[in-house]
Amino acid sequence: VQECSSLPAGIRVSRSLGPMKLWAKASSEGAGGEFPKDLKILVADKAPASALSELRAQRHQVDYHPDLTSEELQGAIEDHEPDVLVVRATKVTKAALTAAPCLKLILRAGAGTDNIDRSSAKGAGVVVANCPGANADAVAELCWALILAADRNVIQQKEELKEGVWNKVTHANTMTHKGIKGRSIGILGFGMIGKEVARRAAAFGMQVLIWGRSYQETPGIVHIPELGIDVESCSSVGDVAERSDVISVHLPKAKGTDRLLDQSFFDRMQDNSIFVNTARGSVVDAKALLNAIESKGLKVGLDVYDDEPVLWTGTFDNELAKHPSTVSTQHVGAGTMQADDA
């Protein structure tokens, strides 16, 4: 539980108990253990019915508008005057915050907060909280789906079979399909999601190389107690690239990560290796990745893109997503019932 001193008296946010589980608790001045007030909560993105029911059972007023666009959010805030705003993909702009004099908390039902104008929120005295780790298993599962599909050309084979093409000579080529067991995987960003990817890599008997903010000062073998395995911390992303058969990206959109994986990074990757990104599109130089696909025969799995739509539905035209060497999904890493219930 994270206590937020600038919230109304007694409001506390639970990160560990799931993205939607938020409650008020009587402050020391409250009478008889009663809630200090009923919270007005605007949920501006899709949320599980069980979470909404739980919030209402805790005597909060919940206004549920899952189809709001970022442009419509300001009007909804003006209409409902919420104490708490819950979003997932919807952008929270400075204009929306200006319309929210009563707002005290924005809760992002996910790991990152890059869809929220945090500078404006801070200026308005609004606390921004997220839910790291709630979707870790779901993202790790998708990551491995992309790795395995890329390694064995699963999507390409399906597309050829739909056209009546039998092309075993290509898809069973043992020179380009390395297999996974006993290979090396480089994990860039070793937080909760990166660790869950490593847990699954251990089941394949893989050597795990990592690069992450918390491990930069301790290069070499590191024991991870919660996983019961040893990993090797590397001094740079380039070192990881050179030594890995598979690269899996779990870096946040933050200062220092924009286009971090550039031409120099991809130049150091092994030929015919696998590159998967389920984190943020902005950490990858898209042109450099396209070049590496052509020059090195990289196999790629992508769930995120730098120019992806904000809305849940729409049109999308992206060269990487359409490339025949790419297994492409639609930023659905957290899109499981288990992640919603976490």
Image (cartoon, helix red, strand yellow):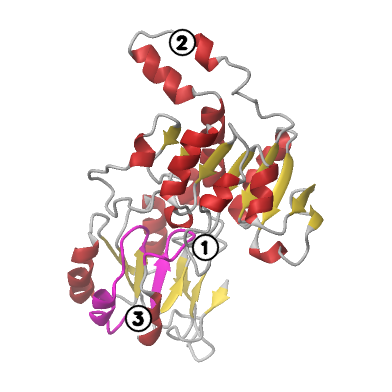
Magenta span: chief secondary structure: loop
The stretch of residues the image draws in magenta is: 87-115
Specify few, some or many for label 3: CA neighbours under 10 Å numbering under 14, 14-19, or 20 or more: some
Q: Residue at x 67, y 49 (%)?
A: 240
Q: In the image, what residue type sits under mark 3?
A: Ser
| Lower sequence index among marks 2 and 1 | 2
Badge number at residue 310: none
Which circle marks residue 167 in the picture? 2
Q: Earlier in the sequence, mark 2 or mark 3?
A: 3
Report the side of 198 relative to 47 (left or right).
right
- In percent of width and height, residue 304 lies at 42, 48
Per the model, the C-alpha gap separating discs 2 and 1 is: 40 Å
Q: Is residue 166 left or right of residue 192?
A: left
In the rendered picture of this protein, how many numbered marks are placed on residues?
3
Q: Which comes before the other along the chain, label 1 or label 3?
A: 3
Q: Which residue is mark 3?
A: 120
The amino acid pointed to by label 2 is Asn
Residue 258, image x, y percentages: 47, 62
Residue drawn 37% across and 86% down? Answer: 123
Q: Are marks 2 and 1 in contact (CB under 8 Å)?
A: no
Between tags 1 and 3, which lies in front? 1
- The residue sitting at 23% across, 79% down in the picture is 99
- Of 208 and 245, nearer the camera is 245
Q: Which residue is mark 1?
A: 257
Give yes or no for contact between labels 2 and 3 (Cβ–Cβ under 8 Å).
no
SS label for mark 3: helix
Q: Tell me if I can see residue 302 in this picture.
A: no
The structure residue drawn at horizontal position 52% and vertical position 31%, both measured from the top left corner, is 297
